[in-house]
Amino acid sequence: MDVIVIGAGASGIIAALKMSKKANVTLLEKNDKSSKKILVTGNGRCNYWNSDININKYNTDSKEKLERILSKKDETYEFLSSLGIYPTIKDGYYYPHSLSSLSIKEIFDKSLEKNVKVEYNVEVLDVKREDNKFKVITNGKEYLCDKLVFAMGSKAAPKTGSDGKVYDILQNMGLKITPVLPALIGLKANESYLKDWNGIRVESSLKLYIDNEFIKESVGELQLTDYGISGICTFNLSSIVSKALHSKKKVNVKINFFEEDFYKFMENNKLDLTIEETMESLFNYKLMHIFFKLAKVSKSKKWIELNQVEKKKLASIVNDFNLDIVGTNGYERAQVCTGGLSLNEINPETMETRINNLYVIGETLDVDGECGGFNLAFAFITGYIVGDKIA
Ligand SMILES: Cc1cc2nc3c(=O)[nH]c(=O)nc-3n(C[C@H](O)[C@H](O)[C@H](O)COP(=O)(O)OP(=O)(O)OC[C@H]3O[C@@H](n4cnc5c(N)ncnc54)[C@H](O)[C@@H]3O)c2cc1C
């Protein structure tokens, strides 16, 4: 049985390795090396797994199918360990013990060298059915195979190789693609104060509203940037935001910059100080001045000198800072995409699509996870399933 796997990224490598003992497998990769995206994951440390993998960590169009896919997580983890990947675990986040993504690439490359025929610099341009086989048309020769596995990634971080061509090929073959949009990405706003808060990092909570309805809260380090907001707590809302903006819905976040009720805090504060002096050690200097400007209060006044409207306004800016979101920071900087090949087109026991002998794995599918190793884990699990079940 001849199998072609397209894409030497996380999902394609695991699929090819797992099936290598029972199939004549060729792995095609358009880059001149494997694992280009893996190298940049986790800031070069590769957060490849998480101790809390479950459906609630993912966005997808079929939770039921996702649950069946994720049920293979333990077997997949064993397989990764069997390749020689030893973890170091921080708050449930798994990294290679070396804390270097290069170690993962090296382990994969050595194992591929021994077990799989890999052809680099081969870009797949199209796929056609020919009798009972697939004809894979590339920038060089054409290949024929009995079974074909798409592991071509999404449109996120195209410099690593994934440029979204996979969606056109799959759509032309009659499969359903839900809209593909950037996710795990910073969010853009359009306010004059953004240049002033650029570079500030602050622990905070973000509440996401869509068409004025509360949707989700995300807590952690918020990065304020010259285009809007970034950081993990922002990323974890971005998939939902991308979809809402795509549907032309109104999106805003409310940022809580202070862990206590600011109004009560100031009422209870009996120091004889101006509001600027009181807030000096609570907030970044530039941020504090944005608060004063938006609340239209004089920094040289004392809290007791503010009228009730001014007090409430300043407190609501600190605890409930409104930011209208107008866009995302795009595919170049996105870590993943939301949307993709609908899980309804997939048999979750095998990763085979509605089209016989055609399989799709990894980020091409309509599944995107939160930050924390969930996306690589999903890519590995789907690669493991197809590698295990292909027969
Ligand atoms: C900056 C960054 C940081 C990240 N950090 C993390 C993290 O710490 N933890 C985590 O879990 N996830 C992280 N992710 C997400 C994670 O890397 C991806 O979800 C995962 O790599 C997807 O694996 P994949 O196999 O589906 O696709 P990819 O890894 O994108 O692999 C697809 C492969 O297919 C090849 N290909 C594409 N088109 C063709 C073609 N036409 N012909 C031949 N080959 C082709 C590509 O060159 C590529 O090698 C991060 C992503 C980015 C961009």
Image: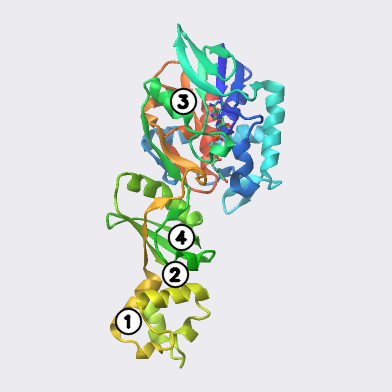
Residue 177 figure quarter = top left
In the picture, the disc for residue 219 is 4
Numbered mark located on residue 351 in the image: 3
Residue neighbourhood size for the residue with mark 2, other residues' Cα within 10 Å, grouped as few (<14), some (14–19), many (≥20)? many
- At label 4, which amino acid type do we have? Val
Under tag 4, what secondary structure? strand
Q: Amino acid at mark 3?
A: Met
User: Which amino acid does the dot numbered 2 rest on?
Assistant: Phe
| Ligand 1 within 8 angstroms of badge 3 C-beta | no
Q: Give me the C-alpha separation between circle 1 and circle 3.
A: 59 Å
Does 27 appear above or below 62?
Answer: above
Residue 266: x and y, percent? Answer: 40, 83
Q: Secondary structure at mark 2?
A: loop
Residues 380 and 102: in front is 102
Whether tag 1 and tag 3 are in contact, CB under 8 A, the answer is no
Pointer 2: what residue? 257
Q: Residue 237, relative to residue 79: is it above or below?
A: below
Query: What's the mark number on residue 310?
Result: 1
Q: CA distance from mark 3 to mark 4?
A: 34 Å
